[in-house]
Amino acid sequence: MLTQEDITTTIGSRVRAARAQAGMSRRKLAEAADVSERYLNQLENGDANVSVGILSRVASALALDLIQLLPAPRAEIALPHGAFGALIAQMTPREQSDALGVLERYLDDRRKAQRGIALLGLRGAGKSTIGAMLANRHGLPFLSVTREIETCAGMTLPDLFNLGGPDAYRKLENEVVKDLSARADRIVLETAGGIVSNTEAMEVILASFRTIWLKATPHEHLQRVIRQGDMRPMRETPEALDHLKALLKHREQEYARADFSLDTTGLSPEDCVHRLEQIAGGPALAQTE
C-alpha cells in the first residue's frame, strides 16, 4: 500500500507540474486557492500535511478535479523508478494521456518491426524482385503468401481455385497469414495483390508487420508483367491497361493503409532496395535484437 511519503510526494509533484502547465506563479496559485505561499511551497515539495479541504481549493484553482492530484493505488499502476518515473511524475494528467498515445504508437511500430516487413501492391510492383534482394542483403527469410498457400494446399493456385473456388483460397490465406505473423524470426513477406480484398488477412498483416505499399504507374505495372514473359493480359483483353487502372483505383484506398509507400516507377531494383532500407529502418531488418 502507499505510504504517507508516497502520497505527499506524488501530490506535490502533480501540483507543481499542473501549476507549470497552467503558467501560474506560486504566488498567483496561493492567492487563487486562498492558501499561504509558504504552505504551497511545502505542498509542492512533499513536506506539507495535506488536508482534503485545502487540496480541493488548490485543484479548483488549477481547473482540475481533486482526483487528478491524488496518486493511484499501487495495485493499479506503479510508477517506474529512475528517470522515466521522475518524468511521468512531473506530467499533468493531460500530458500523461498524450504521452501514453505516443508510447503506444512507438511500441506498436517496434513490435511490428520485430516481425519484419510485408510488401503490398499489385502484380508488377516489384514485390518479388525487390523483396528477395532486400531479404538476401540482410540475411532474412523471404516468404510469399501465395507460395505458402500452395505448399499448405499441396497444389498450385489454379488447381486450388478450380477445386475449391475463392472460399477455399481465402480460408487458406487466413491460416497462412496467421501462421506467418506468429513466427519468432523477422521476415520479408510478399503478399498477394488481392489480399486487400480479404479483410481478415489484411487486418492481421497491418497489425503484425511494418507494411510498405510498392506502387507504380499502371503502364509500368503492365510492362513489367509482359517483360516477365506473361502475355496473357494483352492476349485476353485488348483493354488490359484500362482494366489495370480501374483495379488500382479500386484497391488503392486499402493499399494506402500501409505504414509507408514507395513509388518504384523508373527506379532500378537496387535503387528500390536502398530506399526500402531507408524507409524500413534498422529494427525491421536486423537479424537479432
Image (cartoon, rainbow, N blue to C red):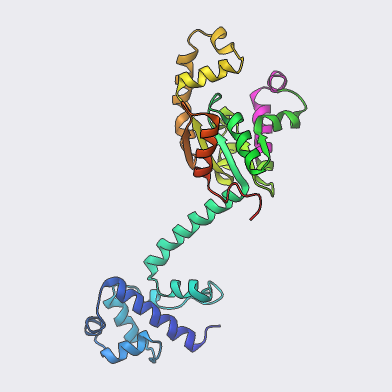
Query: On the rendered image, what quadrant is the C terminus found in?
Result: bottom right
Q: Is residue 53 visible?
A: yes
Along the line of sight, the residue nearer the viewer: 138 or 229: 138
The residue positioned 53% from the left and 73% from the top of the image is 80
Q: Is residue 276 left or right of residue 164?
A: left
The residue positioned 62% from the left and 49% from the top of the image is 286
Seen from this angle, which residue lies furthest right? Answer: 154
- The answer to whether 104 is drawn above or below residue 217 in the figure is below
Q: Is residue 190 visible?
A: no
Along the line of sight, the residue nearer the viewer: 24 or 93: 24
* Residue 79 at x, y percent in the picture: 51, 74
Q: Which residues are magenta?
A: 157-177
Along the line of sight, the residue nearer the viewer: 123 or 64: 123
- The answer to whether 206 is drawn above or below residue 215 in the figure is below
- The answer to whether 171 is drawn above or below residue 157 in the figure is below
* Residue 10 at x, y percent in the picture: 44, 80
Instruction: Give the tally of numbered discs.
Output: 0
The secondary structure making up most of the magenta span is helix
Whether residue 167 appears in magenta in the rendering, the answer is yes
Query: On the rendered image, what quadrant is the N terminus found in?
Result: bottom right
The residue positioned 52% from the left and 17% from the top of the image is 223
* Residue 130 at x, y percent in the picture: 58, 32
The residue positioned 45% from the left and 71% from the top of the image is 88
Q: Kindly indicate the quadrant of the structure image that contains residue 59.
A: bottom left
* Residue 87 at x, y percent in the picture: 44, 72
Whether residue 283 appears in magenta in the rendering, the answer is no
Along the line of sight, the residue nearer the viewer: 235 or 4: 235
Q: Is residue 93 left or right of residue 176?
A: left
